[in-house]
Image (spheres, grey):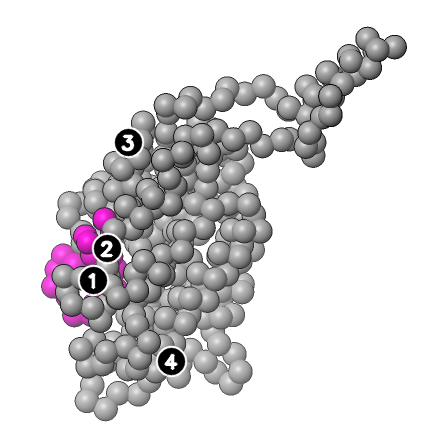
């Protein structure tokens, strides 16, 4: 009888363990970065291929990969990318079509960072459109709220399901990877700094409030899906577009080529990569190798 019971326990333990898969090596770190221009850092030296994505060899994913001494690193980020460009369809750029970003993810991928959402909800274009260009400007936010409907808030609500599916699809491609959603940070301080930066105080507060809303929804989603969320808002306070140029994490309006308005500076990209390295931590390899039970089983008493 004891022999039968022991055999049964052993069989249940094997079933709960699921299919036998190779565990990640403690010395291996395969890293893939997914996302839009806030990850790609267009205009930050030096340009990285492909040209149409306008990404930098010193964007935060590249800085993070160097800090973590990644075994392999694929920067699939691309300026202008939406969630659909990560999961569903190729992205059209000025230099041709760019394949789905998720195709860079493999079963052996250990770490994945994702920054996406602003283009999904139209917030990136709206922020650029709020630049004051006339002597007697009207607030730009009047076009975003019609009656009781806030267009950007409605778009955020409408895209939560898509972001959830994105996480599921990435996890399906790399079941053992650590996934980190990376937020957008503090672009502009309360009240702005008009006319130092040509955006009205009310518009400044509205735009940052929408960025906060986007960050907060993705932070809650990350918690619900059991992945990490890196909130960049605290670290970027005091380094917004109103800060002295040498202290900015983000370019302001009216910058000279190759810099891109309202996008990371070289200083900001480096700071975020460094902060993410600290967030992921020195014990990253052990964390990346944690086994997750399959088939709904948790533990087997012995």
Majority SS type along the magenta span: loop
Q: Residues within 10 Å of mark 4 (few under 14, many from 20)?
A: some
Whether residue 83 sits left or right of residue 275 in the image: it is right
Q: Which mark is residue 268?
A: 2
Distance, label 4 to label 2, CA atoms, is 27 Å
Q: Residues within 10 Å of mark 1 (few under 14, many from 20)?
A: many
In the rendered structure, does residue 265 fall within the stretch colored magenta?
Answer: yes
Distance, label 2 to label 1, CA atoms, is 7 Å
Name the one closer to the observer, 103 or 200. Answer: 200
CB of mark 3 within 8 Å of CB of mark 2?
no
The reply to whether residue 215 is in sight is yes
- Of the numbered discs 4 and 2, the one sitting upstream in the chain is 4
Distance, label 3 to label 4, CA atoms, is 44 Å
Name the one closer to the observer, 128 or 292. Answer: 292
Name the quarter where the N terminus is drawn: top right
**Which residue is depicted at the point 36% across and 35% down?**
282
Judging by the rendered image, the residue that carries numbered circle 3 is: 69
CB of mark 1 within 8 Å of CB of mark 4?
no
| Residue stretch rendered in magenta on the structure | 251-270
Q: Residues within 10 Å of mark 3 (few under 14, many from 20)?
A: some
The reply to whether residue 103 is in sight is no
Judging by the rendered image, the residue that carries numbered circle 1 is: 248
**Which residue is depicted at the point 38% across and 76% down?**
206
In the rendered image, residue 117, in percent from the top left (x then y), is placed at 42, 57
Judging by the rendered image, the residue that carries numbered circle 4 is: 141
CB of mark 2 within 8 Å of CB of mark 1?
yes
In the rendered structure, does residue 214 fall within the stretch colored magenta?
Answer: no
């Amino acid at each position: 009888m004891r022999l039968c019971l022991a055999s049964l326990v052993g069989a249940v333990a094997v079933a709960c363990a699921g299919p036998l898969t190779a565990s990640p090596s403690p010395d291996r770190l395969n890293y893939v970065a997914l996302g839009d221009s806030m990850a790609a850092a267009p205009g930050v030296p030096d340009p990285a291929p492909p040209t149409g994505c306008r990404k930098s060899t010193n964007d935060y994913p590249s800085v993070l990969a160097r800090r973590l001494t990644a075994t392999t690193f694929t920067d699939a980020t691309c300026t202008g990318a939406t969630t659909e460009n990560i999961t569903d369809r190729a992205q059209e750029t000025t230099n041709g079509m760019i394949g789905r970003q998720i195709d860079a993810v493999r079963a052996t991928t250990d770490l994945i960072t994702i920054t996406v959402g602003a283009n999904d909800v139209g917030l990136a274009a709206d922020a650029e459109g709020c630049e004051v260009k006339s002597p007697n400007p009207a607030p730009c936010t009047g076009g975003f709220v019609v009656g009781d409907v806030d267009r950007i808030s409605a778009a955020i609500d409408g895209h939560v399901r898509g972001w959830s599916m994105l996480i599921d699809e990435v996890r399906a491609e790399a079941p053992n990877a650590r996934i980190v959603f990376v937020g957008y940070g503090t672009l502009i301080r309360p009240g702005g700094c008009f006319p130092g930066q040509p955006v009205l105080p009310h518009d400044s507060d509205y735009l940052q409030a929408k960025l906060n809303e986007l960050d907060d929804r993705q932070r809650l989603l990350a918690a619900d899906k059991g992945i990490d969320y890196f909130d960049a808002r605290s670290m970027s306070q005091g380094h917004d577009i109103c800060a002295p140029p040498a202290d900015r994490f983000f370019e302001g309006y009216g910058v000279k080529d190759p810099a891109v308005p309202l996008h990371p500076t070289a200083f900001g990209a480096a700071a975020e990569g460094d902060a993410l390295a600290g967030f992921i931590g020195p014990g990253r390899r052990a964390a990346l190798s944690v086994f997750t039970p399959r088939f709904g089983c948790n533990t087997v008493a012995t």
